[in-house]
């Protein structure tokens, strides 16, 4: 450990000029080529969202939409918990599943790009989904949409936040 400290101190005390601009530019170009593009991450997120939508619609009839009519589904369970927050629970389940699947589909660098832009990612996926739901179903009201967006945002945020920052948040409460 002391060797690391000595190395760091000698590094910070070194006043020699930085590497040549050619070498630095070459490093920057190489890094830019190897980092994933936002479009690639968005495409994989869209794929995860499609799979998550299929799984969610198979188990929960959000806004009257369902893939399989099984009678008693996840929506009935959420209604038993709280009829007022059924849409919030469905939204949280829906986007939490999407971002959980995205974690499996994305590699580490792509996940870091997604986390860096998570507010935009969560908002765009949630609003596009809600727009599709409202275009397809007549059961989307202003109140249900607000509750669904709240739950969806919270569920997705919980899937993208790191364990360390989540534990720090819990300690601060």
Image (cartoon, rainbow, N blue to C red):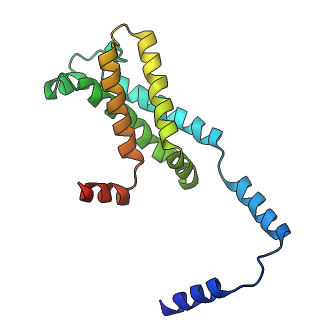
- Between residue 83 and residue 10, name the one nearer to us: 10
Residue 22's place in the image compared with 38, above or below, is below
Place of residue 16 in the rendered image (x, y in percent of width and height, measured from the top left)? 76, 84
Place of residue 81 in the rendered image (x, y in percent of width and height, measured from the top left)? 15, 29
Place of residue 142 in the rendered image (x, y in percent of width and height, measured from the top left)? 34, 15
On screen, residue 99 versus residue 120, left or right, reads left
- Between residue 115 and residue 47, name the one nearer to us: 115
Residue 48's place in the image compared with 70, above or below, is below
Q: Residue furthest top?
A: 138
- Residue at the image point whose x is 58% and y is 85% from the top: 8
Quick one: quadrant of the C terminus?
A: bottom left
- Between residue 50 and residue 8, name the one nearer to us: 8
- Residue at the image point whose x is 51% and y is 30% from the top: 124
- Residue at the image point whose x is 40% and y is 50% from the top: 161
On screen, residue 73 versus residue 19, left or right, reads left
Q: On the image, which quarter does residue 92 sit in?
A: top left
- Residue at the image point whose x is 47% and y is 17% from the top: 132
Q: Evaluate whether residue 58 shows in this view.
A: no
Q: Evaluate whether residue 154 shows in this view.
A: yes
On screen, residue 144 versus residue 102, left or right, reads left
- Between residue 148 and residue 102, name the one nearer to us: 148
């Amino acid at each position: 450990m002391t060797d690391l400290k000595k190395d760091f101190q000698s590094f910070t005390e070194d006043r020699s000029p930085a590497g040549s601009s050619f070498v630095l530019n070459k490093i920057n170009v190489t890094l830019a080529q190897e980092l994933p593009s936002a479009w690639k991450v968005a495409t994989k997120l869209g794929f995860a969202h499609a799979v998550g939508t299929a799984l969610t619609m198979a188990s929960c009839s959000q806004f009257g939409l369902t893939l399989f009519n099984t009678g008693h589904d996840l929506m009935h369970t959420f209604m038993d918990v709280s009829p007022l927050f059924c849409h919030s629970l469905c939204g949280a389940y829906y986007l939490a599943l999407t971002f959980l699947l995205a974690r499996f589909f994305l590699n580490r660098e792509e996940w870091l790009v997604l986390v860096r832009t998570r507010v935009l990612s969560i908002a765009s996926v949630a609003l596009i989904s809600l727009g599709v739901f409202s275009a397809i179903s007549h059961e989307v009201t202003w109140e249900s949409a607000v509750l669904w967006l709240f739950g969806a945002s919270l569920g997705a945020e919980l899937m993208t936040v790191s364990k360390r920052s989540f534990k720090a948040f819990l300690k601060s409460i």
